[in-house]
Image (spheres, rainbow, N blue to C red):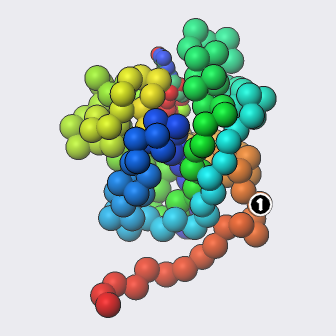
Amino acid sequence: MERTLVILKPDCVWRGLIGEVIKRFEDEKFNVIALRMLHLSAEEAGKFYAVHQGKEFYERLTEYMFGSPIVSMVLEGEKVILRIRELIGATDPKDAVSGTIRKKYALSGLMNVVHASDSLEAAREEIAFFFDEDAIFHYQRREGS
Ligand code: GDP
Ligand code: MG
């Protein structure tokens, strides 16, 4: 089964949207199989977003992402990488399709509620950044009471 790494960014936590966003994922039948709240250090934020080093928004992005509580999680499901990217919507809420999480909640192209891996390789690396294999769980969904 495919896995992806999702981060609920500081603006999601500050505004009390943790439950709201996780509900959207669970409603789509994706399982949360690992979950943790943490602060990134400045170095860790820089390392996590190293792919954007040199871009004009890099400093603002790493400043925004460090020192505030975030929630990181691993989601599992069929085509979860692509489907979560679709569910969250475009980076800038102005470009996001209606019904997507970022369209509904993002404050700006920077403070856009949620991060999600964009490829199999990124998912593998990003999951390993936050979680040891023994912190990742497995279970089957059971419907009903
Ligand atoms: P994502 O994969 O949709 O999150 O977007 P990217 O990987 O391109 O960028 C990573 C993060 O950097 C985004 O989610 C935003 O928080 C921030 N970011 C990206 N592009 C811009 C931009 O043009 N301006 C600002 N201020 N922030 C940006
Ligand atoms: Mg990205």
Residue at 40% in and 47% down: 16
Look at the numbered disc 1 and say if its residue's Cβ is closer than 8 Å to ligand 2: no
* Mark 1 crowd level (few <14, some 14–19, many ≥20, 10 Å Cα): few
Q: Is residue 116 visible?
A: no
Q: Residue 24 placed where, x, y %?
A: 34, 57
Q: Residue furthest left?
A: 98
Quarter of the N terminus within the rendering: bottom right
Say what amino acid the circle numbered 1 marks: Asp
Depth order, front residue of 81/106: 106
91 versus 88 height, above or below: above
Residue where numbered disc 1 is placed:
132
**In the rendered image, which quarter is residue 113 located in?**
top left
Q: Residue 90 placed where, x, y %?
A: 37, 31
Side (left or right) of 39 relative to 21: right
Quarter of the C terminus within the rendering: bottom left
35 versus 38 height, above or below: below
Residue at 52% in and 39% down: 9
Depth order, front residue of 69/105: 69
Residue at 33% in and 43% down: 101
Secondary structure of residue under mark 1 = loop
Q: Residue 46 placed where, x, y %?
A: 72, 27
Depth order, front residue of 55/69: 69
Side (left or right) of 14 relative to 145: right
Count of residue discs: 1
